[in-house]
């Protein structure tokens, strides 16, 4: 049993002799307090797991697309429940501040989701396909391939339901009478590859951001407590637009699907260079 709970229950009785009846009452009270705190802990753990479950563009149980406001609302609801438990139990101010810090991220997450959704919508519009095929891409094909990517991050047993759901969404599209069945095999392969790429954009827009934040936190650990926002922004710009993988692509090129302008050329075009210093006069 938690030592804090025992101390809180038995402290008033430490300086007086205990009868057997008093000891039994104290033990019952300690057991009830321990059970209550255990339930509170399980509730907080469930809400933390709920945040991870709701932070997906696709409902993992039904396979339908989820928009930014819905995702943000669900995550905010979990955070509010955690805050309520923390306030009720009188946790420290630093704990409440960490909860508030997590809540401040939610609006930025919603803005990111809406930006990526607009990008995906524009990419599908450029494919020049019929309205039924476009709807099938958004509602079925992209979500099914997103589920496949999520399944790859799970164990075999945990990922199997996601793969089965993805197959149920995807297979009818290519069967006779399906929205994509009248297209040629080449066109079907093209739509499938494009949907796979866009599903990757959805997945990467959240997972890679968290990985990047973790990397920055590690590299800047020795500078913690110093306000260096310009330096962090420079690191992020260099990471996204200058550093390349072995295949020669940058993070910005992989995200937007096209090669951006040269970062240093853009900087030189927008920065006015200082004139050369005047030479000191020669002495006679």
Image (cartoon, grey):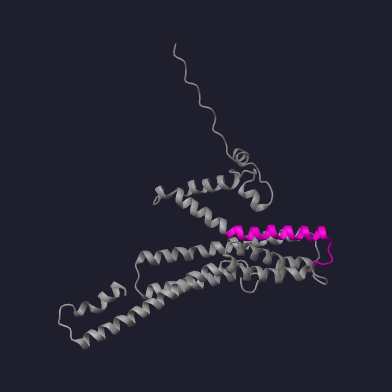
Left or right, residue 138 beside residue 156: right
**Residue 276 in sight here:** yes
Dividing the picture into quadrants, the one containing residue 165 is bottom right
Left or right, residue 60 beside residue 92: right
Of helix, strand and loop, which mostly describes the magenta segment? helix
Where is residue 94 shown, x and y percent of the image?
A: 36, 64
For the image, the number of numbered tags is: 0
Where is residue 268 shown, x and y percent of the image?
A: 60, 38
Where is residue 223 shown, x and y percent of the image?
A: 41, 48
Task: Judge by depth and name the residue closer to the eye, 281 or 88.
Answer: 88
Residue 58 vs 16, above or below: the answer is above
Which residue appears farthest toward the front when viewing the image? 157
Task: Judge by depth and name the residue closer to the eye, 17 or 237.
Answer: 17
Left or right, residue 106 beside residue 126: left
Which residue range is magenta in the image?
Answer: 179-206
Identify which residue is drawn at 77% across, 57% down.
Answer: 190
Quadrant placement of the C terminus: top left
Residue 227 within the segment the image draws in magenta: no
Task: Judge by depth and name the residue closer to the eye, 269 or 242.
Answer: 242
Task: Judge by depth and name the residue closer to the eye, 199 or 122.
Answer: 199
Where is residue 18 shown, x and y percent of the image?
A: 17, 83
Quadrant placement of the N terminus: bottom left
Which residue appears farthest toward the top when viewing the image? 284
Identify which residue is drawn at 82% across, 67% down.
Answer: 181
**Residue 227 in sight here:** no
Residue 185 within the segment the image draws in magenta: yes
Residue 4 vs 146, above or below: the answer is below
Identify which residue is drawn at 26% across, 79% down.
Answer: 9
Residue 3 vs 105, above or below: the answer is below
């Amino acid at each position: 049993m938690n030592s804090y709970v025992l101390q809180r229950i038995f402290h008033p009785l430490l300086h007086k002799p205990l009868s057997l009846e008093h000891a039994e009452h104290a033990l019952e009270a300690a057991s009830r307090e321990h059970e209550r705190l255990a339930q509170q802990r399980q509730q907080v753990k469930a809400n933390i797991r709920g945040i991870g479950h709701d932070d997906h563009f696709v409902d993992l149980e039904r396979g339908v697309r989820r928009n930014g406001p819905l995702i943000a609302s669900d995550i905010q609801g979990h955070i509010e429940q955690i805050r309520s438990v923390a306030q009720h139990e009188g946790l420290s101010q630093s704990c409440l501040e960490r909860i508030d810090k997590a809540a401040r991220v939610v609006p930025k997450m919603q803005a990111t989701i809406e930006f990526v959704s607009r990008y995906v919508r524009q990419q599908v519009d450029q494919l020049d396909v019929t309205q039924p095929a476009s709807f099938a891409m958004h509602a079925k094909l992209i979500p099914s391939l997103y589920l496949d990517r999520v399944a790859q991050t799970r164990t075999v047993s945990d990922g199997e339901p996601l793969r089965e759901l993805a197959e149920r969404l995807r297979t009818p599209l290519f069967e006779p009478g399906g929205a994509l069945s009248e297209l040629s095999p080449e066109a079907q392969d093209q739509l499938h590859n494009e949907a796979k790429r866009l599903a990757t954009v959805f997945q990467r827009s959240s997972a890679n951001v968290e990985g990047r934040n973790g990397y920055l936190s590690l590299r800047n650990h020795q500078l913690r407590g110093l306000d260096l926002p310009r330096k962090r922004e420079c690191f992020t710009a260099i990471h996204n637009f200058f550093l390349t993988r072995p295949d020669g692509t940058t993070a910005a090129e992989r995200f937007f699907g096209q090669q951006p302008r040269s970062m240093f050329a853009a900087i030189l075009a927008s920065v006015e260079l200082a004139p050369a210093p005047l030479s000191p006069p020669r002495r006679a």
